[in-house]
Structure formats: structure tokens, C-alpha cells
Image: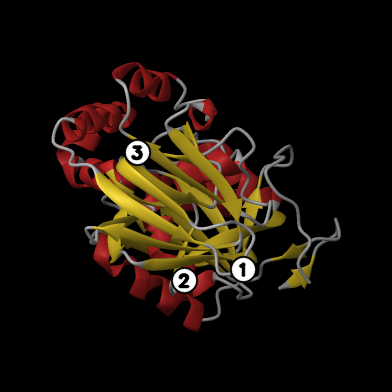
Amino acid sequence: MQTSTNGRTAPTHAALVVNARSRDGEHAFTQARDWLTELGVPIASTYPVSDPARIPETVQEALREGADLLVLGGGDGTVSSVVDYLADELPALGLLPLGTANDFARTLQIPTDLRQACEVIAGNRLVDVDLGLAADNYFVNVTSAGLSVAVTQGLSTRLKKRAGALAYPLASIRAFFRHRPFTAHLRFPDGDHDDVQLDRLLQVAVGNGRFYGGGNLVAPEASIDDHTLDVYGIQLGRRRDLFGVARYFRSGDFIRQDNVTHITTKRVVLETDPPMPLNVDGEIVAHTPQEFTMARNGLRVIVPEDSTAARLDAT
């Protein structure tokens, strides 16, 4: 990298990696390549990837070739699949939100309009954001067990392409009627909270970012730059309690309902009965029991000039 005239560190080798299977991915790749070049972003290598499973190895290849800026086109699942290779490393991330939910982009206030997102990357305003850790898996938004896993399993590619953001509430309704309650035990190794047992749960989640599930707030004050994790558990109580939770999901105020437990911490161990799969940023890649920690300022990313989501304070 070299220092630009505005005092910021400017990239010298940008790699463009686009999930061509995401919504409008193929067209977006061509448009983004042309617009970024026009805006002066030094695109040195390009990778339109038709198989999402190959995105991690493609990103590793780009980094081996010396990329100091990764321009990544895709959704939250795409980001989550490569964040392990960017955490605590020099390359910055420039995001082109091409997914269904785009919760990471929403948290960082990155526009979903492709041209505007390219302009954000050209502006090169860098911040560093926290990352969550589920054992050795980094995540940007949230990890959860329970209803969200069933929702993810019900989100077919066909449904996401046909329904867009409405795919999440549609899949949630289906999953709710098939859900079986479970028990969770929360331990806090740092001693900042007493152990907690939660019975008859609908869902338990550990959040790092601000949004998840297509625009739902983790909690009203949740931030990707506050150096803490937000833990919540929703218990199956009275019907009116569940309606209250559903009503305030978007605003995050559901955490104030009687059947919801909300705790902030830097480290927590989650055990469930029975053991359950974990949804990590939209991908089922882990199981309980699991320890969660946070990596302070673990990722460097480009945001809009007026974004208030985070600041640059890592050395």
C-alpha cells in the first residue's frame, strides 16, 4: 500500500472476487469491474466465481498474489466464508452487497446500489470492526441455535431468488411450526456474570454485529465496534409474549420482553440439551457445546464517509 494525498493508505493491488451465483452476480461483476476501474481503484486481478464453494480458495489465491484490497461481491454467507483469511491481516475489505439479506453491509451503512458501493470503495475510508469467534470460526453478524437453523435450512436458492428479503419471514413461519423447544446453559469463564440456565427455548444467539436475518436488530444498542458480544435467549412462554417478541424483532426491543434474556459479555460458553447445530452467519458449520469470544478490531473494511458504525483505531 501507499499513502494517498488525503493521508489515507491507498491500495496498490486490488482483487475483485464476485460470487456470480448471487442475485445478479454475473451482471454485477462486469459492471463493478468497469466502474471501479473508472473510479481509479487499482484492479489488478478479477475472479468471477460461479461455484460459491470455491470462493475461499479464490480469495487465498488473490492474497498470495499480493492483493492489499479485496473487493468482494456477495452476501453475508460470502463474507463469512472468507473472513478467516482476512482477520488480523493487512488486506482491507471492500464490499459489494449482492446477497439477499446483506446484514453486514447494513451494519456498516454500505449502500446496496452497486454504483454507490463502488464509489464507497473508491473513497477508501478505512475502519476496523470487531469479529466474533465460535471456537476458531470468525463471524461478523451472529451465531445462533434453534429456530434460526431451521430457517437457514429452509432458505432454498429458489426461494431467495423469487422472494428476495421476504424469503426470511416466509422461512421463519414454516420453521416455527416445526420447532421443538430445547434447554441452554450459559457459562461465563471471566466471571462477569453468574451461570444461566434457560428452559423451553425458541432460540439462543450470540451477536457481534448489529443486524441479522434480513434487517433484524440484535439489540437496540448493539454495535460491531463496541468490543462486546450480545447474548440472548427467547423462551417459549405465553402466546402474547411470542407476539410481543415478533412485533419488536426489527427494532431489537424484543430483548425487553419477559420471556427474553439478554446479556453482554466478551466470552461465553454455550451448552444445549440436546446438542444442536449452530448457524454461523447463515451457514451451518458448528455445533454445541461451543465457546464464543470476540476479536477486537479483527477486520479492516471500507465504509462510506458518513458511516457511524465504526472507526479506525487499531495500530
- In this orientation, which residue lies closer to the viewer: 204 or 281? 204
Q: Is residue 180 left or right of residue 126?
A: left
Earlier sequence position, callout 3 versus callout 1: 3
Label 3 amino acid? Thr
Q: Quadrant of residue 167?
A: top left
Q: Is residue 26 visible?
A: no
Residue reaching furthest bottom?
Answer: 64
Taking 286 as reference, is 26 above or below it?
above
Earlier sequence position, callout 1 versus callout 2: 2
Q: Are marks 3 and 2 in contact (CB under 8 Å)?
A: no
Q: Is residue 28 left or right of residue 315?
A: left
Query: Residue 190's mark?
Result: 1
Q: Give x and y (percent) for residue 210.
A: 55, 42
Judged by depth in the image, the label closer to the viewer, 1 or 2, is: 1
Q: Is residue 68 visible?
A: yes
Label 1 amino acid? Asp
Q: Give x and y (percent) for residue 59.
A: 42, 71
| Residue depicted at x 67% and y 52% | 225
Q: Which residue is mark 2?
A: 84
Earlier sequence position, callout 3 versus callout 2: 2
**For the residue labelled by badge 1, is the local secondary structure a helix, a strand or a loop?**
loop
Real-space CA distance between mark 3 and mark 1, rounded to the nearest whole angstrom: 37 Å
Q: Is residue 170 left or right of residue 208?
A: left
| Residue depicted at x 56% and y 55% | 94
Query: If the image is split into quadrants, where does the C terminus sit?
Result: bottom right
**For the residue labelled by badge 2, is the local secondary structure a helix, a strand or a loop?**
helix
